[in-house]
Image (cartoon, grey):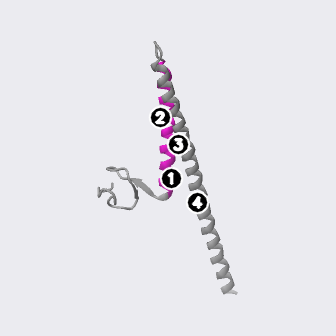
Amino acid sequence: MALFDELKDRASDVVQVAGKKVEDAYSATKLKIQIADKQSAVRTLYRELGELVYENSKKAEPEIEAVEDKIAEIDLVLEGINELKDQERGMKKLVLCPACSSEVDEKAKFCPQCGSEMN
C-alpha cells in the first residue's frame, strides 16, 4: 500500500509541475502576442506621423501640435512595449546588460556578448 501512496504522490507532483509549465507557456505566449500587437500599432503610428509631417510641410502654418501629439502617442506605446518586454525577461530570468543591452541570464557574472561585468 505504501508503494501505491508513493506513486500517487509522485503522479500528483508531476501533474503540478506540468500544470505550472503550461501556465508559464500560456503567459509567455500571451506576452508575445501583446508585444506583437503593440509593435504593429507603433508601425501604424509611424506611418501616420509620416503622413502628418508630409501634409504639414505643404501648409503655410503647419500643425506642430498634431505632430507632437502623435509623437507622444508613439512614446506611450513604446513604453508599453518595454514594460511587456521587462515582464517577459522576468519570466525567463533574464536581465539587460548595462553596457550593450543584450539579454543575459540573471545569474551571470559577465555578459556573454560584450564581456562587461554584470551588476
Give the quadrant of residue 14. Answer: bottom right
- Considering every residue shown, the one lying at the far top of the view is 60
Q: Which percent across, then down, holds residue 112?
A: 34, 60
Vertical placement of residue 111 versus 57, above or below: below
At 55% from the left and 41% from the top, the residue drawn is: 40
Residue type at mark 3 is Gln
Q: Mark 1 points at which residue?
A: 88
The residue singled out by tag 3 in the image is 39
The residue located at (32%, 60%) in the rendering is: 110
Magenta extent: 63-91
Q: In this view, does 116 lie to the left or right of 25?
A: left
Compute the Cα span from label 2 to label 3.
Answer: 12 Å
Q: Which mark is residue 25?
A: 4
Identify the amino acid type marked 4.
Ala
What residue did someone put label 2 on? Answer: 75
In the rendered image, is residue 15 in sight? yes
Amino acid carrying label 2: it is Asp
Q: Give the side of residue 101 with respect to residue 33, left or right.
A: left
